[in-house]
Image (spheres, helix red, strand yellow):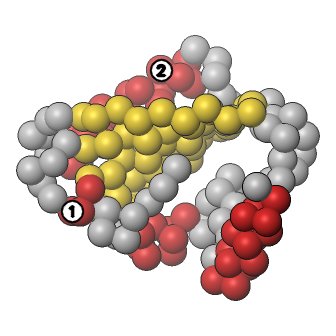
């Protein structure tokens, strides 16, 4: 999942069944342009090992456009219902929601408090990306 510098990030949701699988979704609006639809980018991850980085986990990524004129808090409310339905269906046992309502920099600060997000930043991120490029 990619977050771009000019994106407006509404929020991020994470559902986890520790040791088995997780789901993560982020609602963004490109270029912070209110005339564009919201994007819900989400992914399913099925664990194959206990590694955070360089894992053999299977991941499936998706994007849905949400064309609505609803207020931000209403969009969040609807997404909370979707997440609750996942939880009620047994997909996960733990959930986190991070309200961002800002840019990528704000998202990085907010998400550093997450139990489930493992982000690489700065020099660590640069070195990791270089390693991935060499391997591909």
Where is residue 35 shown, x and y percent of the image? Answer: 9, 50
Q: Residue at position x 34%, y 58% from top?
A: 9
Residue 57 seen in this snapshot: yes
Select label 1 or label 2 by which is in front: 1
The crowding category of the residue bearing disc 2, from other C-alpha atoms within 10 Å (few below 14, some 14 to 19, many at least 20), is few
Mark number displayed over residue 40: none
Q: Is residue 101 visible?
A: no
Q: Residue at x 64, y 18 (%)?
A: 90
Question: In this view of the protein, which residue sits in the foreground, 9 or 18?
Answer: 9
Whether 130 is drawn above or below 44: the answer is below
Q: Quadrant of the C terminus?
A: bottom right
**The residue tagged with tag 1: helix, strand or loop?**
helix
* Image spot of residue 29 (x, y percent): 26, 53
Residue 85 numbered tag: 2
Measuring 53% from the left and 23% from the top, which residue is drawn there?
A: 86
Q: Position of residue 28 (x, y in %)?
A: 33, 52
Image position of 65 with respect to 2: above or below? above
Q: Is residue 51 left or right of residue 73?
A: right
Q: Earlier in the sequence, mark 1 or mark 2?
A: 1
Mark 1 neighbour density, 10 Å: few (under 14) some (14–19) many (20 or more): some
Q: Identify the residue under disc 1.
A: 32
Judged from this view, the residue extending furthest toward the bottom is 123
């Amino acid at each position: 999942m990619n977050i771009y510098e000019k994106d407006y990030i509404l929020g991020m949701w994470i559902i986890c069944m520790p040791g088995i699988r997780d789901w993560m979704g982020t609602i963004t609006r490109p270029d912070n342009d209110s005339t564009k639809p919201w994007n819900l980018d989400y992914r399913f991850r099925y664990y194959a090992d206990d590694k955070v980085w360089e894992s053999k986990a299977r991941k499936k990524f998706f994007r849905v456009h949400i064309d609505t004129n609803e207020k931000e808090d209403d969009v969040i409310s609807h997404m909370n219902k979707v997440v609750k339905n996942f939880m009620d269906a047994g997909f996960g046992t733990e959930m986190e929601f991070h309200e961002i309502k800002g840019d990528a920099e704000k998202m990085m600060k907010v998400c550093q408090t997450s139990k489930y997000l493992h982000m690489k930043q700065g020099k660590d991120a640069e070195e990791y990306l270089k390693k991935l490029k060499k391997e591909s």
